[in-house]
Image: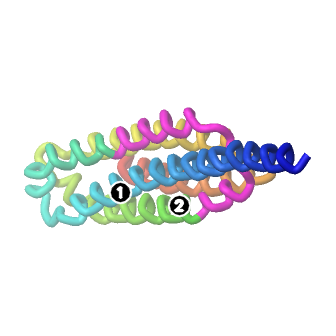
Amino acid sequence: MLVSSIFSFCIGVAVAAPAKSLVQRDLAAFRSAFGAISSATTTFDTAVKGIASPADVNANLPDLTTKAGAIVTAIQNGITTVNAQPPLSLTDSLSLLTLSNTLVSSVEATVSDLTDKKPFVDAATPPQTTFVRTQLQDVRSNAQTYIAAVVAKVPDAVKSVANTQASRVITVLDNGIATYSG
């Protein structure tokens, strides 16, 4: 009987250990996706901050295009990563709140900086207003898909919190699109 109990305990530990490690990897995948999007956004924002004249817009357009594309790529990679993960626990879902807040702040800063640079974008030859608006629309479209993927992985109890966080990002992007639409 003692041998049977010890054997059962060892099997239980062996089965439980990989499950715990799997949950940690799943959360790590979400962290990685959020981090990659935040990083790409910050890198783009740094390039935007470097614009000091209409000539800078034209001179830096290839770099800005590449960096804007990197945001979309990070979001698309995040969609793939998140979709491949099993649903999150309540605890893990709540831990994403900090990552989400960081991403929201990064998007807010970037759109604010883009808004500040609009006079230079409008005065570039040719004006690059349509380019910026199109980039923002592309980011928004992909962000909505990413948000839907993340929200689908959280328990029903926190879906409203996730949707509230998501609406903050979409509102900021919508404001940027509106700025570059007029």
Q: Identify whether 148 is placed above or below 33.
A: above
Residue neighbourhood size for the residue with mark 2, other residues' Cα within 10 Å, grouped as few (<14), some (14–19), many (≥20) = some
Q: Residue at x 78, y 44 (%)?
A: 7
Residue 102 as seen in the image, left or right of residue 181: right
Residue 86 inside the magenta-drawn segment: yes
Q: Which residues are magenta?
A: 71-97
Residue 102 as seen in the image, left or right of residue 136: right
Residue 74 inside the magenta-drawn segment: yes
The amino acid pointed to by label 2 is: Leu
Predominant SS of the magenta segment? helix
Of residues 86 and 168, the one drawn nearer to the viewer in this rendering: 86
Instruction: Give the image location of residue 152, x and y in percent.
Output: 67, 39
Residue neighbourhood size for the residue with mark 1, other residues' Cα within 10 Å, grouped as few (<14), some (14–19), many (≥20) = some
Q: Tell me the number on the disc at residue 39.
A: 1
Of residues 171 and 31, the one drawn nearer to the viewer in this rendering: 31
Residue 160 as seen in the image, left or right of residue 179: right
Q: Earlier in the sequence, mark 1 or mark 2?
A: 1
Instruction: Give the image location of residue 125, x and y in percent.
Output: 11, 46
Residue 122 in sight in this render: yes
Q: Assess whether mark 2 and mark 1 are in contact (beta carbons under 8 angstroms).
A: no
Q: Residue at x 39, y 51 (%)?
A: 36
Q: Secondary structure at mark 2?
A: helix
Q: Secondary structure at mark 1?
A: helix
Q: Identify whether 163 is placed above or below 115.
A: above
The amino acid pointed to by label 1 is: Ser
Q: Which residue is mark 2?
A: 99
Q: Residue at x 41, y 56 (%)?
A: 38
Instruction: Give the image location of residue 99, x and y in percent.
Output: 53, 61
